[in-house]
């Protein structure tokens, strides 16, 4: 399973979601004028990354089972 390139792509996409989430939360915790705008943009990127990860997982499950 860990040798499957599609599985590794799924793991990479989930890690990307975590990274964007942590960046967004870290940015949210800081204070400043433009922080809200950047946090909002990062959270939009997180939603897009989550969508891609869920689609990849669904395709993987559909093709393997």
Image (cartoon, rainbow, N blue to C red):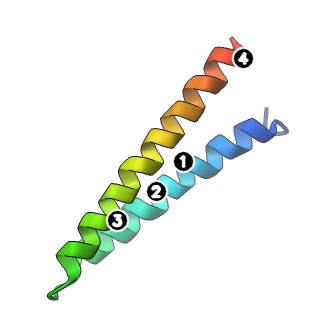
The residue carrying mark 2 is: 18
Q: Are marks 1 and 2 in contact (CB under 8 Å)?
A: yes
Mark seen at residue 14: 1
- In the picture provided, is 53 more to the left or to the right than 65? left
Where on the picture, by quarter, is residue 46?
bottom left
**Disc 3 designates what residue?**
42
Q: Residue at x 74, y 37 (%)?
A: 6
Residue 33: image location, x then y, percent: 14, 87
Instruction: Residue lying at the far right in this picture: please name it.
Output: 3
Asked whether, in this view, residue 28 is left or right of residue 51, the answer is left
Secondary structure beneath label 4: helix
Q: Are marks 4 and 1 in contact (CB under 8 Å)?
A: no
Q: Which secondary structure, mark 3?
A: helix
Establish if 38 lies above or below 9. below
Q: Are marks 2 and 3 in contact (CB under 8 Å)?
A: no
Task: Give the Cα separation between the discs numbered 4 and 2.
Answer: 25 Å
**Disc assigned to residue 64:** 4
Instruction: Find the distance from the CA under tag 4 to the CA under tag 1.
Output: 19 Å
Q: Residue at x 36, y 48 (%)?
A: 47
Q: Residues within 10 Å of mark 2 (few under 14, many from 20)?
A: some
């Amino acid at each position: 399973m860990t040798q499957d390139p599609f599985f590794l792509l799924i793991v990479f996409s989930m890690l990307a979601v975590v990274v964007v989430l942590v960046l967004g939360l870290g940015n949210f915790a800081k204070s400043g004028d433009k922080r809200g705008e950047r946090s909002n943009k990062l959270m939009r990127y997180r939603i897009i990354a989550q969508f891609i990860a869920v689609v990849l997982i669904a395709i993987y499950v559909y093709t393997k089972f």
